[in-house]
Image (cartoon, helix red, strand yellow):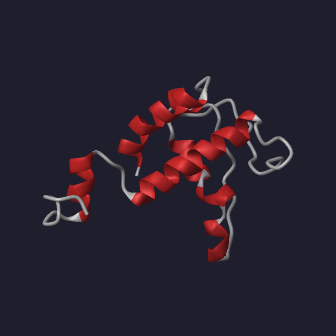
Amino acid sequence: MIRGLEHLSYEDRLRELGLFSLEKRRLWGDLIAAFWYLKGAYRRDGEGLFIRECSDRMRGNGFKLEEKRFRLDIRKKLFSVRVVRHWNRLPREAVDAPSLEVVKARLDGALSNLV
């Protein structure tokens, strides 16, 4: 524990230190991994992991992914399922960035408004 912050709540401590919550940090890591899969870094392992929607009439980013529906609740915890909804809500400038450093910087701004 950091001295002087013991009396603050979890949210207030995060705000004071300028950090995201654990939920947002996990999502940030998942979105970075999804970016790598979609850019082809894991060509063999990630083949068929995500399916891109084929539509010319899209709002937001042009790299939307197909969202699968499952009846079982356990399937909703899979990486390829839990990332799609958040990926589709990202702005275009965060999704079609040229490099990983640019994506990380733009995700910080997008995640402050996303969750």
Image coordinates of residue 97 in percent, x first then y, are 58, 26
Above or below, 16 against 70 in this view is above
Q: Quadrant of residue 74?
A: bottom right
Image quadrant occupied by the N terminus? bottom left
For the point 72% across and 34% down, the residue is 39
Q: Quadrant of residue 96?
A: top right
For the point 62% across and 75% down, the residue is 73
For the point 83% across and 47% down, the residue is 47
Image coordinates of residue 59 in percent, x first then y, are 54, 34
Q: Which sits in the foreground, 81 or 99?
A: 99
Q: Which sits in the foreground, 53 or 47?
A: 47
Q: Residue furthest top?
A: 98
Residue 92 visible to an observer of this rendering? no
110 displayed left or right of 101: left
Above or below, 80 against 7 in this view is above
67 displayed left or right of 107: right
Image coordinates of residue 98 in percent, x first then y, are 62, 23
Q: Which sits in the foreground, 60 or 14?
A: 14
